[in-house]
Image (spheres, helix red, strand yellow):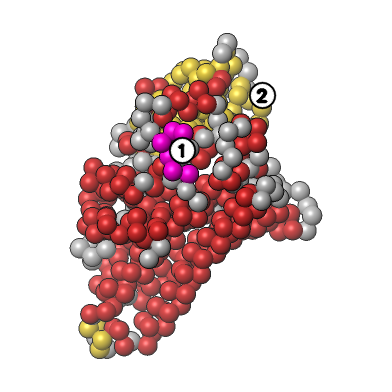
Amino acid sequence: MSRATDRVAPIADILRKDAANCDRAGQLTAVTEDAVRSTGVVKMLQPKDFGGTEDHPTEFMETVLEIASHSPSAGWVAGVVGVHPHEVALGERRMQEEIWGDDPETWIASPYAPMGRARPVEGGYVFSGRWPFSSGTDLCQWVTIGGFITEDDGETIIDRRARHFVLPRSDYEIVADSWQVVGLKGTGSKDLVVRDAFVPSYRVIGTEEITEGTAAARVGGRDNPLYAMPRNVMFAGAVSAATIGICKGVLDAFVELTRTRDGRYGKSSLDPYQLAALGDAAADIDASARHLLSDVDRTYELCAAGEPTPVSQRAEVRRNQVRATNRAVAAADKLFRVAGGVSLREDLPMERLWRDSQSAIHHIQNVQDPIMQAWGLDFFGHPIPPTIKF
């Protein structure tokens, strides 16, 4: 078994049995939260000087993928919340001490969409806004959220470079009942509201150097190649790992259903059409996982050699990530369509896993066409659209 499988195997049954309860609760239950915490996945990218383990990024992605295959919502939260320490590790140390100094187990939510507005004042900013899709937010004590700096009127944007503003739980509101969705229900990805919160300058993170993977050199003290990994390889990679893991869950559910089922035309495990669909899907989901993990590996090797990751490679990695997730979800969808009417039953996991895979592909990091267009433009030497950050 891989180290990731070793981490997850002891709690796999717990995750599977509790997944429907997470859906009903609209967030991870205490049982699943404890199980996820026991794997250490949310501390894998956290600095050692703040209680983290600084694991290889590929092992982190593998662990997220494995968790998601048993409980999609748990894997999604593990990936999205678990990747945040990677960015926070590249911010001001004073901020890191406030977050982890008293409790290294602290979780950090997002979202990064620059929907906030920050008005400059002495020592920092007055910050306001509303954001959807804050995955795992009820379990987090801090949040990193996106926004733009404005004029004194609080509306007119004066700098189009998005920044991330880091706030404690006391400075924002989680909007109850704002997560009513068809899939990934257990992620509890609710809306957040901030009203005129003061954010000191040391809790504001610029994104350019982190996107490029050059922030560690400026910050100092972060010599592990992990912290030279470009942000979009890491964040999009975490989303990709969770998405592919969910599709692996669909595959596993199909196999379990097919192994013992007798259909109208005989044993499903002998049905040539189902076997053909199974072979295609198994190959495509496996290829998607290998594609994702090999790209993380080769990017890490470049970082370990002290080399910057060129934009062409970052673009290629993102091209491969979106293709991997779309390939995996298409494979899961094919399995669901050939599984027969029994797959619709709510007392079996396949319909829920399928809904979760369809929901996962809607994340902005999984949207394929803009990334393919931007990669193609870069490939032919044309400028990349400013809306795409590789």
Mark 1 Cα-neighbour bin, 10 Å: few <14, some 14–19, many ≥20: some
Instruction: Name the main secondary structure of what is drawn in magenta.
Output: loop
Question: Image point 65% across, 43% down: which residue?
Answer: 212
C-alpha separation, residue under disc 2 versus residue under disc 1: 37 Å
**Disc 2 crowd, CA 10 A, few/some/many (<14, 14-19, 20+):** few
Q: Which amino acid lies under the numbered mark 1 shown in the image of this protein? A: Lys
255 shown above or below 206: below
- Which quarter of the image is occupied by the N terminus? bottom left
Q: Is residue 25 visible?
A: no
Disc 2 target residue: 158
Residues 174 and 81: in front is 81
Outermost top residue: 122
Left or right of residue 383: residue 148 = left
Q: Is 52 inside the magenta-drawn segment?
A: yes
CB atoms of marks 2 and 1 within 8 Å: no
Q: Is residue 253 magenta?
A: no
Identify the element where label 2 is drawn. strand
Q: Position of residue 190 (x, y in %)?
A: 37, 38
Which of these two is toward me, 17 or 338?
17
- Part of the protein shown in magenta: 49-54
Would you say 288 lies left or right of 35 here? right
Image vertical order of residue 216 relative to residue 6, above or below: above
- Going from the N terminus, do you reach mark 2 or mark 1 first? 1
Residue behind mark 1: 48
